[in-house]
Image (cartoon, grey):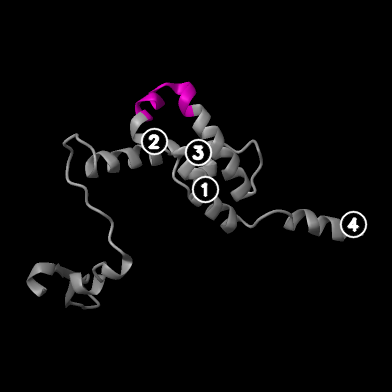
Amino acid sequence: MVTHSVSAKINWGLRHDVLRIIYNGAILPILSYGAPAWIESLMKKHNAIKLKRAQRMMNVKIARAYLTTSYEALCVLTGLTPIIIELESQARIYHDTRGNEKHEQYDAPKHYSQWNHPADALELIKKNRDENTRLRYIRMAAKA
């Protein structure tokens, strides 16, 4: 009987990948709603603490960590961007793409199928046991 209850405690609750999907799909959009309008208010510490508290609770559940684990360590363990950095990024993207302010040009991320292959960017010139291997960079525009 004891092993059965211990097994139930270990497996109780949702898996971490499911919790991550819930966080990214439901909680983060709610927390970031209208962020470009109120991002300046995060300069006050008490406002930032409230958002960190909400993310920390979810990070504890995802990582299945102790409640005494620090916020920064939980972000590293779960691989989630800290909420303040995420909101600043979303606000910057909004202002660069749709806002009236003039910022630097926004470079949208590419789908992985459009990434350059590393073998196309480097060419092996010489390889000896005595010397180090030398590589020469090839410009992608010249090959295209």
| Mark pair 3, 4: CA separation | 36 Å
Find disc 1 in the rendering and name its residue. 26
Across the whole image, how many numbered discs are drawn on residues? 4
Find disc 3 in the rendering and name its residue. 72
Q: Residue at x 74, y 55 (%)?
A: 12
Residue 20, above or below 48: below
The residue nearer to you, when weighing 84 against 25, is: 25
Find disc 2 in the rendering and name its residue. 34
Asked if the residue at tag 4 contacts the one at tag 3, i.e. Cβ–Cβ closer than 8 Å, the answer is no
User: Is 46 a magenta residue?
Assistant: yes
| Mark pair 3, 2: CA separation | 25 Å
Asked if the residue at tag 3 contacts the one at tag 1, i.e. Cβ–Cβ closer than 8 Å, the answer is no
Q: In which image quadrant can residue 144 be found?
A: bottom left
**Residue 43 visible within the image:** yes
Find disc 4 in the rendering and name its residue. 2
Q: Residue at x 30, y 70 (%)?
A: 113
